[in-house]
Amino acid sequence: MRVLRLPFVYGDGDPHIEEAIPMMRGWPPSQRMALIHHADVAQAVARVLDTASPSHRIYNVVDDEAPDLATVFASVGAPPPDGSAGEAARAFDVLLDGRRIREDLGFKPEFPRLQDAIAAGA
């Protein structure tokens, strides 16, 4: 069995970021958020399935850059979060390290940054 740990998945006009804005409204604007484009999730799944004996059982699948929430909000035209949630937001202040899947399986995101996906219309 292999496990792919996914952060917040986005892409191709899906409403996930817009839908999450109300929940994250009180989080600090400087808090970073791990993301992955759904096309890159598909690539990661294919790489795990195509590798007979991957070196590890668990892989984190993430973009090359975790943007701050002000950038994430701006990507959908929303004003930055206000930071009013204080300590309650800290439970979500977690980033993933994707080096293992890159090194073991040659994974390289097609959209390494949120801005790359936006520029490509993806």
Image: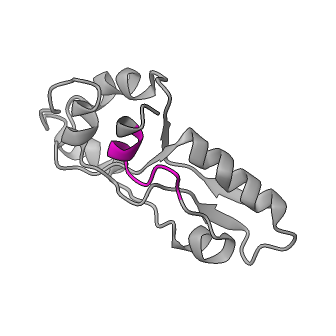
Q: Is residue 85 above or below residue 51?
A: above
Q: Position of residue 14 (x, y in %)?
A: 49, 23
Tell whether 111 sits left or right of 115: right
Q: Residue furthest front?
A: 120
**On-image quarter of the N terminus:** bottom right
Count of numbered tags:
0
Q: Is residue 77 magenta?
A: no
Tell whether 53 sits left or right of 24: right
Q: Residue at x 19, y 36 (%)?
A: 85
Q: Residue at x 41, y 60 (%)?
A: 64
Q: Is residue 73 above or below residue 2?
A: above
Q: Position of residue 103 (x, y in %)?
A: 59, 77
Tell whether 38 sits left or right of 42: left
Q: Is residue 72 above or below residue 43?
A: above
Q: Residue at x 71, y 74 (%)?
A: 56
**Residue 49 in which image quadrant:** bottom right
Q: Position of residue 69 (x, y in %)?
A: 24, 42
Specify the segment rendered in magenta: 109-117
Tell whether 93 sits left or right of 71: right
Which of 81/103 is in front?
A: 103
Q: Residue at x 32, y 44 (%)?
A: 115
Which of 84/121 is in front?
A: 121
Q: Position of residue 79 (x, y in %)?
A: 15, 26
